[in-house]
Amino acid sequence: MQLFVDSSDICKEFEDIADYKSQHSGDEKYASKRYTEAEELENKGEYEQALELHKEILAIRCQGNDMTTLADSLDSIGSVYMMKNDFSKANQYFSKALKYRSLDNDLIGFCTVHVNLSKMYFLRSLHTNEPRYLNNAVWALDIALAHISETRKPELYKSWKIKYTVLRAQMLRFSSEIVIENYRKVLSELTAFYDTVKESSRTEIQNQRMTAKNNIAVILAFMGEKEKAEKLMTDCLSEKEALYNITTNPKNTPCSITKNNLKAIKENRLQDLIFEY
């Protein structure tokens, strides 16, 4: 669905993009190409460059009339600010993205923004030790999980339940009476999921399998099963290195999270463990 977007309204609300001018104003083909480049910069951890590019793209899309792509840009900028730990800016952009997702009746996008808001609140709670941010994180994630079922896409719903139930359990690990039970339930779900894909040779399924293996190892570590967690994370790393041919292509670095997790498990730094999604 496409709706007219008042570009002057966007630029007024986000003064930090007002200076971005481009001869490609309204050119979505060009914006999409640049968007891919920005995502590649994010994956490399080059957040400043990614942010600059995303703002240029947003300025271009402000001159168009596609509500969905405009919301994509707002959401992406919010995500980069979140990775930079600028939670105030992240919240500003996520909130505006949520507005346009709602106006466009984009239910999946609406749920995605709530997931991002949840991650942002969770990270903010870790940085500030303020319980209210943790509560907000769980609240936002619960909204996403509640509404994703309305998409009437069973496979998508199942996938989200697996991924974000894990995230929810991680959020709740600070409540000791609740967390162990949550982890046991999530561990059971993830193990069942892993068993359904562990024999597949398809690259997409292999990626899902390695994500599940990483997350199972993280949960085992949180539950005090260090030896099992270390073995499973080691297996996960070996499998990733083989799949991505790290030895012959050292620039390919999809193993960084797994390497960091393995080191954190060995050094008992549970606070540094990261789930994959």
Image (cartoon, rainbow, N blue to C red):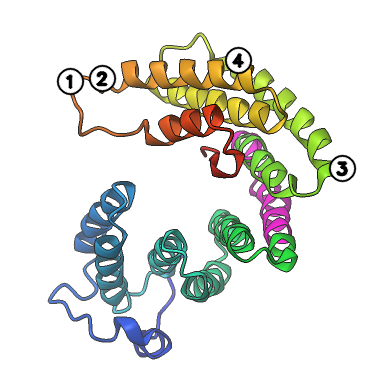
- Tell me the kind of residue under disc 1: Thr
Viewer-side label of 4, 2 = 2
Tell me the residue at 75%/62% (across/down): 135
**Separation (CA) of disc 3 from disc 4:** 31 Å
Q: Secondary structure at mark 4?
A: helix
Residue 71 position by quadrant: bottom left
Badge 4 density bin: few <14, some 14–19, many ≥20, Cα 10 Å: few
- Tell me the kind of residue under disc 2: Asn
**Separation (CA) of disc 4 from disc 2:** 25 Å
**Separation (CA) of disc 2 from disc 1:** 6 Å
Which label's residue is closer to the chain start, 2 or 3?
3
- Tell me the kind of residue under disc 3: Glu
Q: Which residue is mark 2?
A: 245
Is residue 142 in the magenta section? yes
Q: Which residues are magenta?
A: 137-158
Q: Is residue 57 left or right of residue 277?
A: left
Q: Secondary structure at mark 3?
A: helix
- For residue 177, the mark is 3
Viewer-side label of 3, 4 = 3
Picture coordinates of residue 273 (x, y %)?
55, 39
Residue 223 position by quadrant: top right
* Whether residue 254 can be seen here: yes
Q: Is residue 99 left or right of residue 263?
A: right
- For residue 248, the mark is 1
Viewer-side label of 3, 1 = 3
